Image (cartoon, rainbow, N blue to C red):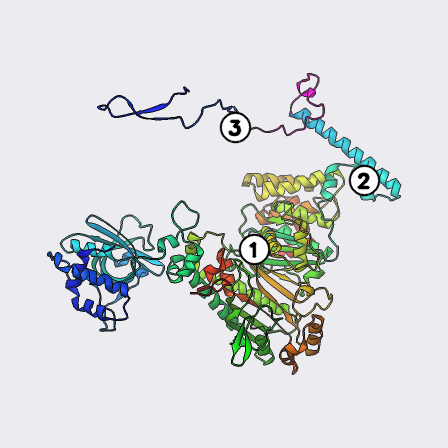
Amino acid sequence: MENATTTVNCTANGPQIPMYTLKPYQTIDIVQLPNVMYKMKPYCGTDQGGSSSRGGSAEPSGPLSCLERRQEDVLRRLEAMQATVSRLEQRYNVKVTAAASSSSSTSTTTASAGSSLPTFVGEPGRILDLAVSADPSSIPLSLVALAEQVSSKYTTLLSTFVHSSVAGSEIPDRLQGLLKSNGGRSRADCQVAVTLVWKKVSYGPQLVVDPVHQTSIQGEANVARYLWGLLSPPDLDPARATLEDELVDLAQLQVLEGSSKERAAALRRLNSVLGKQNSWLGSGQSPSLADVVCWSAVQQTGLAQGAPANVQRWLKACDQHQVFASARGLVAS
Amino acid sequence: MSSAGDGAENQALSKKALKKQQKDAEKAAKKAEYKKENAQETPAAEVEDQSKGMYGVLPMNQSQERLSRRLHRVDELLSDLASQAVWVRGRLHTCRSKGKQCFFVVRQQKWTVQVVAIQNEKTSKQMLKFISGISAESIIDVEGVVEKVDKKIMSCSQQDVELHVKQVWVVSAAEPRLPLLIEDASRPEGEGDLATVNQDTRLDNRILDLRTVTSQSIFRLEAGVCRLFRDYLTSKGFVEIHTPKIISAASEGGANVFEVTYFKTKAYLAQSPQLYKQMGICADFDRVFTVGSVFRAEDSNTHRHLTEFIGLDLEMAFNYHYHEVLEVIGDMFVSIFTGLQEQYAEEISLVGKQFPSEPFKFLTPSLILNFIDGVNMLREAGVEMDDEDDLSTANEKLLGRLVKAKYDTDFYILDKFPLAVRPFYTMPDPHNKKWSNSYDMFMRGEEILSGAQRIHDPAYLSERAKEHGIDLETIRGYIDSFKYGAAPHAGGGIGMERVTMLYLGLDNIRKTSLFPRDPKRLTP
């Protein structure tokens, strides 16, 4: 760009001298334009080897090795932490509980699942309020069953509300009082509250526990996982836990959200799993999280009729079991 | 504004009327002057006028005759009246003339319709000139033919039709210079460079400000709040009572009451009808409510304090537990909110055009949390406070946000406040002296109701008053009213202006008080 003054000429028949001159109103310096849309720092830590490692041919670069290094780093830090804990243990002469020690020896994932339960549950004066919003057009049966279980384990305040975004008349009476503590229980005496709000939610039920530190938990299966965490300690056997997790995901992704094809496939999968187990999807003598969520999904989508034999047998067993007692009433109607 | 030409027609048409008006001593001096000016210029232009008798200034209405002519309301002007001639009375909202055409808008309360005048064999040039000379906000009668329009008129409430003018008469002229323009006062703030009107100018010229569609809607909705409050409570067996506003002693303390001279002694303006409501309970009315002015001599210049406001108060005897009352109040709010949502949807959306806000959300039944739950939520958000600290305004707001994030409701109830922060007549919790049977209710994170179970036992009441260091003699009458047996009771009171403000998400309580009173304003 040449740095000349811009001139404005008069009309053609006028004298050919500039009418007035203008100084350029911006100085054109060389502006460094970035050649990428935006910059960001590499998100995997490369500080291990310092700056020399970046160019070094000995270190294989790429995201995979980065992750590897990070994992090793994390493991090292965990070991260091473990060492610190055991040192403290010796110094103050305390014993770690069996659960804690066993979880540290197995896998880290189950340990983190166990810690999802807020530590203050049961403390006097503190109430763990679980605010669940659900769409009245698809009743989360697992929530009803699990809320019942939670209230048998803790003193629980159950309550149901209708949000102003849905007209009260749209919600039948039995849903308006779906979750309800009997006998005027005082909120101050309760350890846990399950607050169900009927409203339009687009992606299945939502659970909010602590709006400051958590996002909402989305989807019936995930809400059920949270509630289950209040009921029983996490399964420490990685194989069983994985199978259960898979089945819960199966219920959410392939049955509740799936196409008819996926639903049929999911039923076949359930059938084959049930063929190997004695009566429940989990390995125990009573229904597991997978049982509750799968049952809820199968019932909501109306797959109970025409289900394969093992599934039929399992559904019958569910019908008899008290865990499903309160939710079953919603299916029949 | 106006010129000689239209004056000529005025004169020719209604000379008698004008003379009458001029003679009228009560007429504003300016107006008379304006007319006289016009009269002097009359002889200048006496051209053929084919619209003679179709426009002009009507003589002052002294109820000379009672016409059987029907005046249509502006909101009745719909496409099914097409090609009919109708009469409409309203204010001249805006007017713009262009060559041989003149477009003007007639406004009636919150409805507006466009009127078209085109120069032709029936409508003279002089008539057009007269119309464009009418000052804005004048009340005019218009006869016109309803015509459907092809393209919706977005600037008017009647979008499908316009009126083609036949006659235009001025019923009452406005002064040509207005202290504020209705159009400016109706404009959303912070939008482009167009003029808006600041709060004080609005309040100084409140009657003009109240003519805006927004104000019209706000006060209709406010009337709805009051009506729904009455309707709900009446349906629940409450009796409306009226309590005195001039009282002999300050009810609580005495710091924030207005003193008035009462013959040879002094009296105070009531800062709450509470004592009288309670006496209503002692007098066996069982459930009472009252709607009336409440006075607070608090020198607080905030967006939510007034020195005089309308209190909607209720008091109710209960059978076993004060939660019976809490639930009635909670349901009352739900009924008010649903009523507003259903019956005032148009007003809400009209207000939202000028002052946008998120629609008000609530739960049915109302959400009740304990005070300590609120404190715990605040603590988790990083606020440091003791169990028995009262909520500061900032914490109230924050808690409102947290509750909204968790439960998605703008209205909730906080129960079981610490006894230490409540007045002496509040009933303590039976199990833990730290807490009390008292509650606050919040809308959009601002407190709108404060209430409690009251102590109905005179001996205990005296004891509590002593603990608070209150001289028993000053409240003797109050304590004595419980001496002859009193039912356990609880209640509370809300400010009508505050509820309206928060429901609509407005930023200032002065917008919802017709003629607000605050420490700096006594007029209009």
Q: Which residue is mark 1?
A: B409
Which label sits on residue A64?
A: none
The reply to whether dot 3 and dot 1 touch (C-beta < 8 Å) is no
Relative to B381, say whether B35 is above or below. below
Give the Cα separation between the discs numbered 2 and 3. Answer: 49 Å
- Tell me the residue that label 3 is attached to: A37
Q: Give left or right: position of B466 versus B178.
A: right
Write the start and end of the magenta stretch as one range: A39-62
Find disc 2 in the rendering and name its residue.
A102
Left or right: residue B236 compared with residue A233: left
Of the residues shown, which amino acid type is indicated by label 1?
A: Thr
The extreme bottom residue here reads B484
Q: Is residue A55 magenta?
A: yes
Residue occupying the point 73% across, 51% down = A120
Residue type at mark 2: give it. Ser
x then y, percent, for residue A290: 67, 45
Circle 3 residues within 10 Å: few <14, some 14–19, many ≥20: few
